[in-house]
Amino acid sequence: MPHSYSKERETATMSSLDIEKIRRDFPILRREIDGKRLVYLDNAATSQKPLSMINCLNEYYQRYNANVHRGIHTLSEEATALYEGTRETVRRFIDARESCEIIFTRGTTEAINLVAYSWGRQNVLPGDEIVLSPMEHHSNLVPWQVLAQEREAKLVFLDLTEDGEINMETAAKLIGPRTKLLTITQMSNVLGTITPVQELARLAHKQGAVVLVDGAQGVPHLETSVQNLEVDFLAFSMHKMLGPTGVGVLWGKKELLNAMPPFMYGGDMISSVARERSRYNELPWKFEAGTPNIADVIASGQAIDYLNALGMETVREHEVEITRYALSRLKELKGITIYGPKDATKRGGVVSFNMPDIHPHDLGQILSDAGIAIRAGHHCCQPLMKDLKVMGTARASFYIYNTFVEVDMLMAALREADKVMGNVACR
């Protein structure tokens, strides 16, 4: 029999977070779509934004709009203090040693490209191997394809188990003396798989390789310490963790960043300029050419403050519970295929699935008509889709403001979609 919704169950499993209070902090969640309450389940693409972050963004333009690092007047000094204060906030959030190791970029994509361009072209040589997983987002695949072609290096892909986890037995064999770089997702945006980063990093470091982690999905949901992960680079985006779009972070070990040439050239990344030669600035500004995204960086600090107030352990606890509930409910649908680990503790709040005889795009449109926002398609992971032997999947992804009630609403909409498409797939 299908599960019936239990208010007592939700209260018991989500007591560590006051979800209704949290939801009041997000104005967009009060929106209706064609008269239906918005159910936002596309958090792996981007999260929604709390009012405190929105207000912080507005305050910059209303009170201290000025360029940073270049002025001695009050507005510039205030903006600079807040901008650099966010760098320190990020440092503490990911447990980095020094704030100069925090580089602001436009997003995870730019951060990875920075490493590929600046570190990769100095260090990757013909015959070297770059090791990746089959789960990588295009942003953590295409830059390395280009680099490998340019440098006559080779891409090596790890194996996955049937449940979509890294096969560590074969990983120990594939990460070898020719490995120059291991570049790996912290959490898959399709399968939800949480990667054993520390174990893989230790294997890579034994071979003298450098390790980069794509934390776009992991950092917003998992308590992340770059010291504990034992990696060399970490890239992530603020828009997936309550912050604005257009801000990313690259963390790198100071000694690696110091040895890397700048990624872009121009103002603020220099310490002095003559007609024929320039001397570059110190870290982190060496990698931040031009006027940065000041307002959004400052507002990103407010987003991190919001997550810190909740506690990342509590964020993770909520995610495990709602994912476990979603997995159990989705299994009620006859013929459904759910991708990724079966155990909610081994995956993030991302559930990709396919229903029999319904194209993911059709499913996404039907759910949208019901006010439910999910993702449908290849999720910028076309090679993984080929491995799964599908063109794409439907994907529901959860965050701090999602509830069991919304999972039940998703289930009701999926049953209706099944009727609309003329199937009899539900028990």
Image: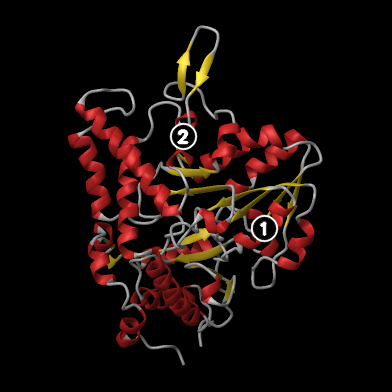
Q: Residue at x 47, y 25 (%)?
A: 281
Percent coordinates x, y for residue 89 in the rendering: 36, 48
Q: Which residue type does callout 1 highlight?
A: Arg
Q: Residue at x 50, y 73 (%)?
A: 421
Q: Secondary structure at mark 1?
A: helix
Asked if 404 appears above or below 362 in the picture, the reply is below
Using the image as rendered, state which of residue 373 and residue 78 is in the foreground. 78
Q: Which residue type does callout 2 highlight?
A: Pro
Q: Are marks 2 and 1 in contact (CB under 8 Å)?
A: no
Using the image as rendered, state which of residue 365 and residue 379 is in the foreground. 379
Q: Residues within 10 Å of mark 2 (few under 14, many from 20)?
A: some
**Total numbered labels placed on residues in the image:** 2
Mark 2 vs 1, N-terminal side? 1
Which dot marks residue 202?
1
Q: Residue furthest top?
A: 275
Q: How is the image coloured?
A: secondary structure
Q: Residue at x 31, y 72 (%)?
A: 17
Q: Secondary structure at mark 2?
A: loop
Which dot marks residue 192?
none
Answer yes or no: is residue 224 visible: yes
Residue with the mark numbered 2:
284
Q: How many angstroms separate mark 2 from mark 1 (CA)?
A: 27 Å
Asked if 19 appears above or below 377 in the picture, the reply is below
Percent coordinates x, y for residue 378 in the rendering: 58, 57
